[in-house]
Image: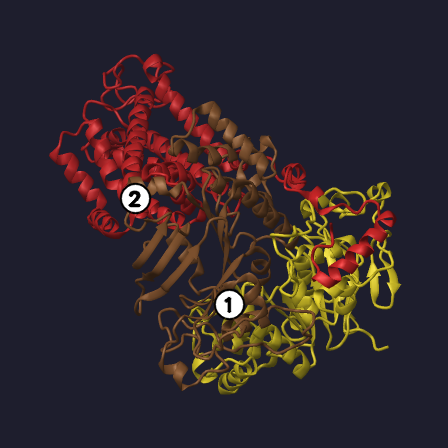
């Protein structure tokens, strides 16, 4: 049984000019010990998907099963218990820590809320985790503004790990950091995964980072998963034209002054195109694409694509 | 060799307690793209503001010279500088939402520049504005011209910013992180557009970015900045093949790449330890506290920039190790 | 090994090369030595950043503001007067102690003179400070508490709860507040507690609106998301996570609210709707107003007391605004 199993999940928002279908029928699984990368551009619904799985946003439909229990139907008390096992790391290390609390308060509060340990035991847990993420113990008495972005992200990671979760949803954890700091944080996430046996749902717009960090990759476009494959397969034989375009858009020294791979903007999730969602930007679109939505089908074992023209991989 | 369009010589920008830009020199030729790369805190954005003479009041420029098309910018009075800004030197910023005025239509904001600098008004200005929107590849410009900024996507807004910047056919365009707020596919479109305009309007571009990939793909010449200083200058090919300065090498090694088979299960990323704040108050080389090859002498003096080959400068005495192509890993 | 970022074939040659080179560059560290344990930037960065806590910084800005300091000094004098009144003048300030219409300075025993009934003006002003401060502080405390409660509930929960509470706030805001105050005091007994509660009733909607706006903005911040995902209860999120961040504008508002409450109490007393058994600044002005031509000091002295106290509170409010506003103190 998968650790996390999401089936046909939708999150729609009420907005002026009609429903905004941020997440529109997504199914995915995260196995124990696995890192699943979720890539897509801003506005594709990947952050909303992460927040829905965290139950920070209410789903419109579908199921989120964690360890076999559907957490969309839990009452407040049982949801609180379930939350211990799923935690989140946020993108902006400046907005995700309460500026009015010391690091010690920030890390102790979750333990208090969940009634873990007595005062001395809590102190020990907090000291252990702050050292694990690479900060000295005297950080605990300081306030967030005394730390740099990379250090704050370490604190954010410590907070996410303090309840000893099984799954961590990482929402663009390194996007706001400088390049020289990104590697530090990615290495820290790898270490924590090894030491604590974590599973990650790793949300990012940065393909290079996902290339390094994920075991399996899901590509999301306008609220839907359009391609899913294991890491090696996706980069060597991508099938969906959108995946190809994303990869071609990553700046590369080998492609000096090369033209942009696709034109146009992401359509509004309030006004999703008919047929294949990608047809307005797809260089290969035909009448079939404009009228009929492609099924999400297997082209090889473990490799699924939602495109009418994706050829099966020959063995 | 023709005189460069822009020549920055020994520029220092100083605040009461810090010196975010120290003795910076570089040149930009006509129609050339110079990239300035660095992380936040490297002084790259303040350099751009210094070029436009838009530094905050508390900033002082104790020494240095900026020459644009043979004119000394510090010798110009306010009025002459205002005239130069927007007409001959234009700038675009990172955040297209906040750099456009939200209560004016985009047409109004484009025609404003035309009226100010070229005295074009009314219908003529409007048709020029439509031409400009066409130039920056905004679909359906006749209709779009009456839109407000919030009705446009991020990429479209950056195109509008570019249209405003190139309205008077400037000779130099300063682009400060023009694509940082944009998605990869949109980033590729905007960079492609900038380069096309550079060619069509034969303007020079100073591209300020933190993204090494962007530099590699679009720049003619690269200046790497760290803590206010130029630490390395090179042609992009050479920079990626054989990065010389320990900082540049660290950056290239630390960034995961799409083209390499690096995966977390079998390899750690190479880290540059610490952060740029450790350069504050450093008497010697600003990179010393994070440097893997630092020696005792690095703490005592700031290394000079040395020309190691044509078009190649580096500010580290310990970087001259005969090299196999580092850059082979990056597809060069 | 540093050469992990290469394709398999290249990696082999790189590794061989790197090993061959190892002696030449002895300082080249292995990747593992930059393990996450004790991030090398941990101490240096915290030393380099501003070590003053957010509150300390605001306090410093506030203490350096001469206007705010004048306000604090004057208000302290008023507080002192209120505290010392029963010690210096143990007798009832409403009792007749001397001949009427003694001008200030005429009799050293009554430095500020006496009124038309021979009551000591200085004693009245000192005792009046008690009632003014009591009404001002208690009404503000009540209005603030209720306003914060309603505003926080509306802003945090949103939805139908918000709709309902906003309607309630609007009902109170559409009724002219002073008329409501007069009506409430006229219906109930005009005692000091009644006046206080009545003033609180008309001031809470302002606080509620402000709190609601702050809560709606802060509710969406990532640290609140984090708190929710950690399973914190609503009360904890409202009072421990959001409220401390919503306080700065509320503190500023409350200083102005105290001033407004003092003015309202004075206005009520002036109109004869105050508590007849205690002396207040407003009632003193009310009693002296018919004699303004012959004995103007009877209105002027308590009037000045009101003016300076309200001014002091407003100056404090401005000072707090500057100190707590993130635009003035970059860190919050």
Q: Chain of mark 1?
A: B
Is A14 above or below relative to C276? below
Is B109 above or below relative to C9? below
> Which element carries disc 1, helix, strand or loop?
loop
Q: Nearer the viewer, residue A299 or A23?
A: A299
Q: In the drawing, what numbered circle is on residue C328?
A: none
Which residue is the extreme one toward the left?
C187
Q: Residue at x 64, y 77 (%)?
A: A258
Q: Residue at x 49, y 37 (%)?
A: C67
Is B184 above or below relative to B314? below
- Residue C225: x and y in percent read 41, 47
Q: Chain of mark 2?
A: C
Q: Which residue is mark 1?
A: B100
The residues bearing labels 1 and 2 have C-alpha atoms spaced at a distance of 34 Å
Is A266 above or below relative to B316? below
The residue carrying pointer 2 sits among few (fewer than 14), some (14 to 19) or many (20 or more) residues within 10 Å by Cα, namely many
The residue carrying pointer 1 sits among few (fewer than 14), some (14 to 19) or many (20 or more) residues within 10 Å by Cα, namely many
Chain with yellow colouring: B
- Residue B205: x and y in percent read 69, 72
Tell me, yes or no, whether dots 1 and 2 are on the same chain: no
Q: Residue at x 87, y 68 (%)?
A: B310
- Residue C38: x and y in percent read 64, 37
Q: Nearer the viewer, residue C30 or C328?
A: C30
- Residue C292 placement, left or right of C84: left
Q: Nearer the viewer, residue C212 or B115?
A: C212
Chain with red colouring: C
Q: Is there any visible trace of residue B223 in the rendered image?
A: no
Rendered shade, chain A: brown
> Which element carries disc 2, helix, strand or loop?
helix
Q: Which residue is mark 2?
A: C151
- Residue A283: x and y in percent read 50, 81
Q: Quadrant of the C terminus of chain A?
A: bottom right
């Amino acid at each position: 049984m998968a650790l996390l199993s999401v089936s046909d999940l939708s999150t729609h928002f009420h907005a002026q000019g009609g429903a905004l279908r941020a997440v529109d029928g997504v199914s995915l699984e995260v196995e124990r010990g696995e890192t699943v990368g979720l890539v897509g551009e801003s506005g594709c619904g990947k952050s909303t998907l992460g927040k829905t799985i965290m139950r920070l946003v209410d789903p419109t439909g579908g199921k989120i099963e964690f360890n076999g229990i559907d957490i969309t139907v839990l009452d407040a008390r049982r949801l609180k218990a379930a939350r211990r096992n799923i935690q989140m790391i946020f993108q902006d290390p400046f907005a995700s820590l309460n500026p009015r609390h010391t690091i010690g308060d920030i890390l102790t509060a979750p333990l208090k809320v969940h009634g873990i340990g007595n005062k001395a035991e809590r102190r020990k847990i907090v000291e252990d985790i702050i050292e694990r993420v690479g900060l000295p113990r005297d950080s605990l008495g300081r306030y967030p503004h005394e730390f740099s972005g990379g250090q704050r992200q370490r604190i954010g990671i410590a907070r996410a790990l303090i309840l000893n979760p099984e799954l961590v949803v990482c929402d663009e954890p390194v996007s706001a950091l400088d390049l020289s700091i990104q590697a530090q944080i990615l290495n820290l996430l790898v270490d924590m995964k090894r030491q604590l046996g974590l599973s990650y749902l790793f949300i990012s717009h940065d393909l290079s980072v996902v290339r390094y960090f994920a075991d399996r990759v899901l590509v999301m476009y306008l609220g839907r998963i359009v391609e899913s494959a294991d890491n090696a397969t996706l980069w060597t034989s991508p099938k969906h034209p959108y995946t190809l375009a994303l990869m071609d858009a990553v700046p590369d020294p080998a492609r000096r002054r090369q033209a942009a791979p696709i034109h146009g903007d992401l359509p509004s999730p309030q006004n999703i195109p008919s047929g294949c969602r990608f047809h307005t930007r797809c260089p290969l679109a035909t009448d079939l694409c404009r009228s009929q939505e492609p099924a999400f089908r297997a082209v090889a074992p473990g490799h699924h694509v939602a495109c009418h023209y994706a050829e099966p991989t020959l063995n | 060799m023709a005189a460069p369009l822009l020549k920055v010589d020994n520029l220092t920008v100083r605040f009461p307690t810090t010196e975010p830009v120290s003795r910076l020199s570089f040149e930009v030729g006509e129609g050339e793209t110079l990239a300035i790369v660095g992380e936040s805190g490297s002084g790259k954005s303040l350099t751009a503001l210094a070029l436009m003479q838009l530094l905050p009041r508390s900033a002082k420029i104790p020494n240095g010279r900026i020459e644009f098309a043979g004119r000394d910018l510090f010798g110009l009075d306010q009025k002459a500088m205002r005239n130069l800004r927007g007409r001959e030197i234009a700038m675009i910023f990172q955040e297209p939402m906040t750099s456009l005025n939200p209560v004016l239509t985009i047409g109004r904001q484009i025609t404003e520049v035309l009226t100010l600098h070229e005295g074009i008004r009314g219908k003529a200005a409007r048709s020029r504005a439509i031409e400009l929107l066409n130039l920056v590849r905004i679909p359906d410009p006749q209709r779009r011209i009456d839109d407000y900024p919030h009705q446009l996507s991020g990429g479209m807004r950056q195109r509008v910013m570019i249209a405003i910047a190139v309205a008077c056919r400037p000779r130099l365009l300063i682009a400060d992180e023009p694509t940082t707020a944009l998605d990869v596919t949109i980033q590729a479109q905007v960079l492609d557009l900038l380069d096309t305009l550079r060619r069509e309007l034969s303007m020079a571009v100073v591209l300020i970015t933190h993204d090494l990939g962007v530099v590699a793909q679009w720049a003619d010449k690269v200046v790497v900045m760290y803590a206010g200083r130029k630490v390395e200058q090179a042609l992009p090919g050479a920079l990626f093949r054989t990065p010389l300065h320990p900082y540049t090498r660290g950056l290239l090694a630390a960034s995961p790449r799409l083209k390499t088979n690096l995966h977390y299960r079998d390899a750690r990323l190479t880290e540059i330890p610490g952060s740029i704040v450790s350069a504050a108050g450093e008497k010697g080389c600003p990179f010393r506290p994070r440097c893997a090859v630092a020696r005792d002498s690095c703490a005592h003096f700031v290394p000079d920039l040395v020309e190691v080959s044509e078009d190649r400068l580096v500010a580290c005495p310990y970087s001259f190790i005969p090299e196999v192509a580092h850059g082979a890993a990056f597809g060069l | 090994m540093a050469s992990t970022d290469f394709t398999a074939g290249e990696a082999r040659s790189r590794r061989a090369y790197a090993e061959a080179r190892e002696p030449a560059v002895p300082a080249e560290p292995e990747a593992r030595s930059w393990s996450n344990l004790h991030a090398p930037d941990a101490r240096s960065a915290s030393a380099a950043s501003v070590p003053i806590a957010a509150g300390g910084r605001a306090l410093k800005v506030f203490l350096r503001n001469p206007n705010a300091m004048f306000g604090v000094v004057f208000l302290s004098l008023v507080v002192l007067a209120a505290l010392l009144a029963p010690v210096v003048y143990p007798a009832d300030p409403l009792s007749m102690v001397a001949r009427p219409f003694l001008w200030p300075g005429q009799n050293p025993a009554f430095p500020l003179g006496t009124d038309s009934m021979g009551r000591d003006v200085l004693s009245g002003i000192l005792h009046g400070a008690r009632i003014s401060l009591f009404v001002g502080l208690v009404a503000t405390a009540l209005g603030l508490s209720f306003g914060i409660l309603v505003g926080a509930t509306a802003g945090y929960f949103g939805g139908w709860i918000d709709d309902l509470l906003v309607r309630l706030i609007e009902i109170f805001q559409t009724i002219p507040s002073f008329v409501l105050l007069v009506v409430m005091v006229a219906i109930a007994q005009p005692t000091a507690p009644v006046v206080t509660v009545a003033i609180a009733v008309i001031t809470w909607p302002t606080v509620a609106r402000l709190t609601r706006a702050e809560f709606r903005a802060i509710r969406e911040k990532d640290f609140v998301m984090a708190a929710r995902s950690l399973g914190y209860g609503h009360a904890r999120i409202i009072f421990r996570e959001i409220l401390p961040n919503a306080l700065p504008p509320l503190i500023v508002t409350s200083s102005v609210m105290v001033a407004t409450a003092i003015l309202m109490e004075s206005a009520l007393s002036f109109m004869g709707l105050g508590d007849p058994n205690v002396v207040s600044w407003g009632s003193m002005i009310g009693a002296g107003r018919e004699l303004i031509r012959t004995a103007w000091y009877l209105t002027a002295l308590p009037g000045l007391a009101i003016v300076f106290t309200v001014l002091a509170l407003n100056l404090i409010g401005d000072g707090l605004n500057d100190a707590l506003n993130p635009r003035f103190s970059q860190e919050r």
